[in-house]
Amino acid sequence: MTKKILIVAASTRPTRIGHHYAEWFAQRAGNHEAFEVQSVDLRELNLPLIDEPRHPRFGDYQHEHTKNWAATVVGADAVVFVMPEYNFAFTAPLKNAIDYLFKEWNDKPVGFVSYGGASGGLRAVNALTPVMFALNMKTVHPVVAIPFAMRYVKDGTLELPESFDETADALVAALADAIGPFEADTQA
């Protein structure tokens, strides 16, 4: 049975490169027989700063944008955040999108494609990991960390070495493996 993987592009900057990495990872994930891919670009989603009056754990959403976002996340069996590193951390739009919801994230395997300078965005992943723990998400490895990410985007085209394809494929396989035990746990 095909499972849905939600790929979230976490940069909203006008000069961003993350959407190239999100498209690349979506293609890699789409090659895996276990997954149907759904991509969400936070720039296009354009959520306002959290404007729900109640805590998300109640699921009593008042705004259509929140209801739509919740339905998207609920429909996913696994999530991958494609994220840059900003000042040793993750992006504010990503945190905002995560914080809109609570139960919808619970029990989902989550993977990361990070990019940035020398660290390849790993400091952003490390900063986000406690948030994933608080949401009862299962972090899956390997992390696809892309150092000096600008060097691989030339004239609007992404040109990555094959080694990144191999790591991406390993992450997709690990996500597929992680979904099985979560289904069994929720049926018990």
Image (cartoon, grey):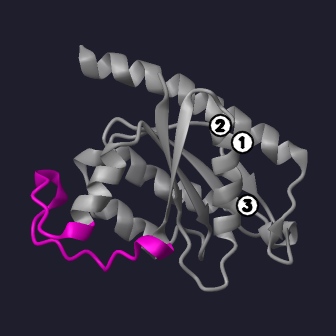
The answer to whether any part of residue 142 appears in the image is: no
Q: Main secondary structure of the magenta part?
A: loop
Q: Secondary structure at mark 1?
A: helix
Q: What span is in magenta? A: 43-65
Q: Which residue is the site of mark 3?
A: 120
Task: Indicate whether residue 173 is drawn in magenta.
Answer: no
What label sits on residue 20 in the rendered view?
none
Q: Secondary structure at mark 2?
A: helix
Q: Which residue is the site of mark 2?
A: 171
In the rendered structure, the answer to whether residue 6 lies left or right of residue 16 reads: left
In front here: 73 or 112? Answer: 73
Locate residue 186, reporting x and y percent.
27, 22
Locate residue 113, reporting x and y percent.
64, 53
Q: Which residue is the site of mark 1?
A: 168
Q: Are marks 2 and 1 in contact (CB under 8 Å)?
A: yes
Q: Secondary structure at mark 3?
A: loop
Question: In the rendered view, would you say 80 is above or below 31?
Answer: below
Task: Indicate whether residue 51 is drawn in magenta.
Answer: yes
Residue drawn at 46 percent across, 27 percent down: 179
Q: Gap between marks 3 and 2, in whole Å?
A: 16 Å
Question: In the rendered view, would you say 177 is above or below 84?
Answer: above
Locate residue 66, reporting x and y percent.
24, 65
Q: Amino acid at mark 3?
A: Gly
Q: Gap between marks 2 and 1, in whole Å?
A: 5 Å
Q: Amino acid at mark 1?
A: Ala
Q: Gap between marks 3 and 1, in whole Å?
A: 14 Å
Question: In the rendered view, would you say 83 is above or below 45?
Answer: above
Nearest-to-viewer mark from 3 and 1: 1
In the rendered structure, the answer to whether residue 108 lies left or right of residue 144 reads: left
